[in-house]
Image (tube, rainbow, N blue to C red):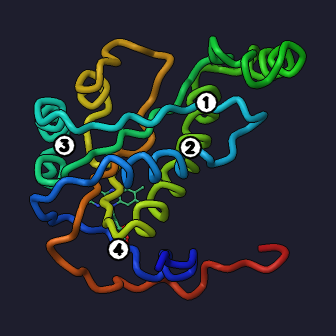
Amino acid sequence: MALTVSEAIAQRRATRQYKDAPIPDETLDLIVNNALEAPSAFNAQMRDLVVVRDQAVKQAIFDASGQQQFLDAPVVFVVVGRSEVVPEDAEEILGAELTEKVRGFNGSASAAKLREIGIRDAMLVAGFLLLAAQEQGLSTSPTTGWNEDGVKKAIGLEARDDRSIALVIAAGYADEHPEHPGRAINRRVDDKY
Ligand SMILES: Cc1cc2nc3c(=O)[nH]c(=O)nc-3n(C[C@H](O)[C@H](O)[C@H](O)COP(=O)(O)O)c2cc1C
């Protein structure tokens, strides 16, 4: 039986050791589709999800990070922010009027602000993905410990200033069961600081 959202949240742990076992295509498709259901500003979807199964691409991500899980896990997801004013295909889903609104909103943004806009949309996809994978019995390793230019080069985005890397996530069947590392108890703020 599928996990509830609460169960998926409770069971998810950052996992760095994986069995040498492939993820069935239907399972992978479901996880990717669920992750891409994440909301985005204006529904402009200023993010992409790169599904890496090619061992040479995984090797290049390992080279950019030194993190072994990218070599061992059957799949590595690279969550990419689209740091651009408006995606070229935006009109297909938004229509002309809303596309112009997005262009107006983002057109005056600095490069740093555009990067932030893409990273925000991308991080929601990443969060959805962690739970969607957990629901399917997979474990995940979310990471930011890599060289961004190296990861971009690995996935064919070399010298692309209109793309940024939000999170790289290894995923597969766990070969370890990490303990809950604990959480700070004072991170909730009611109403005001
Ligand atoms: C933004 C972010 C970056 C992270 N970067 C790395 C990383 O580079 N390598 C790694 O092994 N774990 C990384 N982690 C995993 C965290 O260490 C882990 O999520 C944290 O210790 C809490 O453990 P839990 O996920 O099991 O609750 C990262 C997690 C997040 C959310």
Q: Secondary structure at mark 3?
A: loop
Residue 74, given in percent of the width and then of the height, sits at: 19, 50
Badge 2 amino acid: Leu
| Amino acid type, callout 1 | Met
Q: Residues within 10 Å of mark 2 (few under 14, many from 20)?
A: many
Residue highlighted by disc 1: 46
Asked if one can make out residue 123 in the rendered structure from this viewpoint, the answer is no
Q: Which residue is mark 2?
A: 36
**Crowding near pointer 3: few (<14 within 10 Å), some, many (20+)?**
some
What is the C-alpha distance between the residues marked 3 and 4?
Answer: 20 Å
Q: Which label sits in the foreground, 2 or 4? A: 2
Mark toward the start of the polypeptide (2 vs 3): 2
Query: Dot 1: what SS?
Result: loop
Please tell me whether residue 169 is drawn above or below residue 111 in the rendered image. Answer: below
N-terminal of the two: label 1 or label 2? Answer: 2
Instruction: Provide the secondary structure element on which disc 4 rests.
Output: loop
The residue under the point 23% across, 66% down is 173
Q: Are marks 1 and 2 in contact (CB under 8 Å)?
A: no
Answer with mark 1 or mark 4, whichever residue precedes in sequence. Answer: 4
Which residue has dot 4 on it? 13
Q: CA distance from mark 1 to mark 2?
A: 11 Å
Q: In this picture, is 47 found above or below 137?
A: above
Q: Name the residue type under label 3.
A: Ser
